[in-house]
Image (cartoon, rainbow, N blue to C red):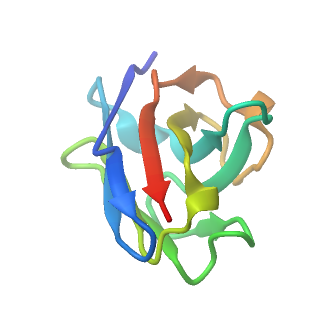
Amino acid sequence: QVQLVESGGGLVQAGGSLRLSCAASGRTFGSYAAAWFRQAPGKEREFVAAISRTGGSTYLADTVKGRFGISRDNAKNTVSLRMNNLKPEDTAVYYCAANSLWNLYQGADRYDYWGQGTQVIVSS
């Protein structure tokens, strides 16, 4: 069992940057792959990025490649999402998720644990 708490959301102008953090409970966070999803009003939850248990593998959605980066620090039980060159279409609630699988997945149904989300608003 792992509990996830996101932080770092806020209001930023287009072209700006934000760094989201996800803090995980428990001492075995290194046993979980992690990911970030986002959900804009009226839209389905969308995959953003995933990272393997050790951090050795990452996968980013095409819509954020070259602008976003995902990383983790298992010693601190955290996963981060660096977001650069933000666009108004990046506005959404961002969720941290985790599962105990070895491979990286885009499907939200592959993740067992979810945080409560943090709001990101990008103004034009």
Q: How many marks?
A: 0
In the picture, measured across the screen, residue 1 lies left or right of residue 42, that is left
The one of 22 and 52 positioned closer to us in this rendering: 22
Residue shown at 64%/59% (left/top)?
A: 89
Q: Position of residue 45 (x, y in %)?
A: 73, 36
Q: Is residue 39 above or below residue 90?
A: above
**Residue reaching furthest top?**
1
- The answer to which image quadrant residue 40 occupies is top right
The one of 93 and 34 positioned closer to us in this rendering: 93
Q: Position of residue 65 (x, y in %)?
A: 63, 77
Q: Position of residue 58 (x, y in %)?
A: 58, 67
Residue shown at 35%/59% (left/top)?
A: 12
- The answer to which image quadrant residue 83 occupies is bottom left
The one of 104 and 116 positioned closer to us in this rendering: 116
Residue 51 visible somewhere in the drawing: no
Q: Is residue 90 above or below residue 92?
A: below
Residue shown at 48%/69% (left/top)?
A: 86
Q: Is residue 42 above or below residue 17?
A: above
Residue 52 visible somewhere in the drawing: yes
In the picture, measured across the screen, residue 95 lies left or right of residue 7, that is right
In the picture, measured across the screen, residue 46 lies left or right of residue 6, that is right
**Residue reaching furthest left?**
76
Residue shown at 35%/32% (left/top)?
A: 28
Q: Position of residue 104 (x, y in %)?
A: 70, 54
